[in-house]
Amino acid sequence: MSTKSIHRFFLVVALVVTGFSYAQIQPFFEENNLNFQEHFFEALKQKAINNFGKAVESLEKCYEIDQNNTAVEFELSKNYLELKKYEEAEIFVNRALKKEPKNVYLLQHKEAIYKAKNNLEKAIEIQKEIIKLNPKFSDELVLLYIQNREFEKAGKLILEIEDMALSTTRIKSYKEYLENRKLPVLTSQNNIDTSNEDIETLKKQYKEHKDYKILQQILIKEAESEYFENLYNDSKEALELFPSQSFLYKMNGLALNKLGKYNEAISVLTVGIDFVIDNNKLEADFYEELSISYKGLNNNNEALKYQQKAKELRKEN
């Protein structure tokens, strides 16, 4: 296969994946626009190896050739997001959306930008637009409501989804999560060994200052000491104060697994994993806990699936 043919193949694949038609870029397959193909192909190659800065450089050269190309704007926005340059990412996705305001791929990407900025209110507004175009994405809005602590709205939306017969396994997990958070904390807590002054001292400090770093130390020590009922209660209460901290969901899920409450663990871990950003180790921890949950329910296929995901992420570290 010639170099030109190879470049053309990868370009078509990229456009299919991003939701844009081959026709949008077809004019650039003419000889006088070979440079465009070369730069676009190079951008895809650099992005594939996580060299996002180099990808942007190549895409900027494409943009110099054609400043009205939606696919290039989309790729620029995606690479800027990876670089955590949120303002630039938003500028380019907005330019693309001016041309294609009902493009679900673009809208989902814009929502991802807002989520990365932890602007859940704006993310919710974008998700509402997506649902108008395709109701099957309603489960994502439920998750956003939960993450934004709008539990009543999440519950109402779940009922609407069930009425429309659009319920999914994710929806079932979110519903269980909402039901479980109403349960009282466990009353038969472990008696903490009074010789373990570290935990008691840390708890006194946390009570005075409500410092998240102190809380992390408490939960880690409770897990190490196998005080799983305490770990469950303390992590559950902490989630009311720090609802966007993925570590708390992981520790709550771990405690539930140790207590044999596997369905509850799945619902908590399913919600919490969406808060993990750019942390392969923590994401792998979530998958390992999910694997344990499903193994506890004798669902070996799901257990193996999540175990494999964890293993792949460990390799990348």
Image: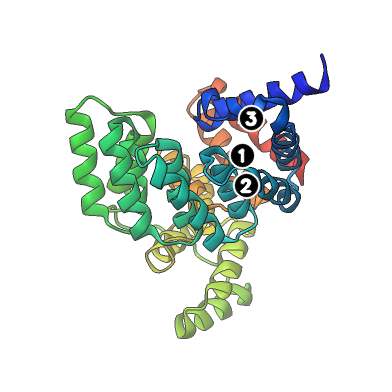
Q: Secondary structure at mark 3?
A: helix
Q: Measured along the vertical axis of the image, is residue 222 above or below residue 306?
A: below
The image shows residue 158 at horizontal and vertical percentages of 24, 39
Amino acid type, residue under disc 3 in the picture: Phe
Q: Is residue 77 visible?
A: yes
Find residue 6 and report its image quarter: top right
Image side of residue 264 versus residue 152, left or right:
right
Q: Which mark is residue 288?
A: 1
Residue bearing mark 2:
63
Q: Is residue 265 visible?
A: no
Q: Measured along the vertical axis of the image, is residue 126 above or below residue 27?
A: below
Residue in the picture at 54% in, 40% down? 69
The answer to whether marks 2 and 3 mark residues whose Cβ atoms lie closer than 8 Å is no
Q: Considering depth in this image, is 279 or 190 the residue closer to the camera?
A: 279
Mark nearer the N terminus (2 vs 1): 2
Residue bearing mark 3:
28
Question: In the displayed image of the protein, which residue is found farthest to the bottom?
Answer: 208
Question: In the displayed image of the protein, which residue is found farthest to the front?
Answer: 32
Give how far apart the Cα atoms at labels 3 and 1 are. 46 Å
Amino acid type, residue under disc 1 in the picture: Glu
Q: Considering depth in this image, is 45 or 299 the residue closer to the camera?
A: 45
Give how far apart the Cα atoms at labels 2 and 3 are. 12 Å
Q: Considering depth in this image, is 173 or 35 the residue closer to the camera?
A: 35
Residue in the picture at 40% in, 36% down? 104
